[in-house]
Amino acid sequence: MKPITIHTRCFPAKGFHAITLFPVIFYRDGRLTPREVRHETVHLWQQATLLVVPFYVLYLLFRLVGLLRYRDSDRAYREIPFERSAYLLEQREGLTRKAMAFGWVRCLAG
């Protein structure tokens, strides 16, 4: 699955360079690096595997739990299993679909 990329001037919000809303990667401020493309492609596979809506429900739940647990927005974001997996996998080339789709499950335990 090759992502569709769209450059915008105001989305995503400041502080973020790219966001994946199945099946599109929106980015701002310049170009996407190969590492950013891998990161966002991992999210694309996560979303597709979970049939999109459950991904967003889980993502928001993980975020809320993280905010309550850590009382720190950045840490809460970084501790979301989907993000932890994407940050680990973005460093690798030649990712498998299985790793991209299900790698986040290994990040559940903490």
Image (cartoon, grey):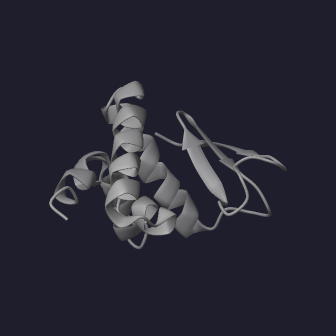
**Above/below status of 26 relative to 16:** above
Question: How far across and how far down the image is residue 107, in percent?
Answer: 22, 60
Tell me which residue sits at (35%, 41%) in the image. Answer: 61
Tell me which residue sits at (38%, 32%) in the image. Answer: 57
Which corner quadrant of the image does residue 60 belong to?
top left
Side (left or right) of 21 relative to 26: left
Does the rendering let one see residue 95? no
Question: How far across and how far down the image is residue 18, in percent?
Answer: 63, 54
Tell me which residue sits at (20%, 51%) in the image. Answer: 105
State the residue in front, 36 or 58.
58
Check the picture and name the quadrant holding the C terminus.
Answer: bottom left
Question: How far across and how far down the image is residue 76, in percent?
Answer: 41, 61
Which corner quadrant of the image does residue 36 belong to?
bottom right
Question: How far across and how far down the image is residue 52, in percent?
Answer: 41, 29
State the residue in front, 103 or 68.
68
Tell me which residue sits at (24%, 47%) in the image. Answer: 102
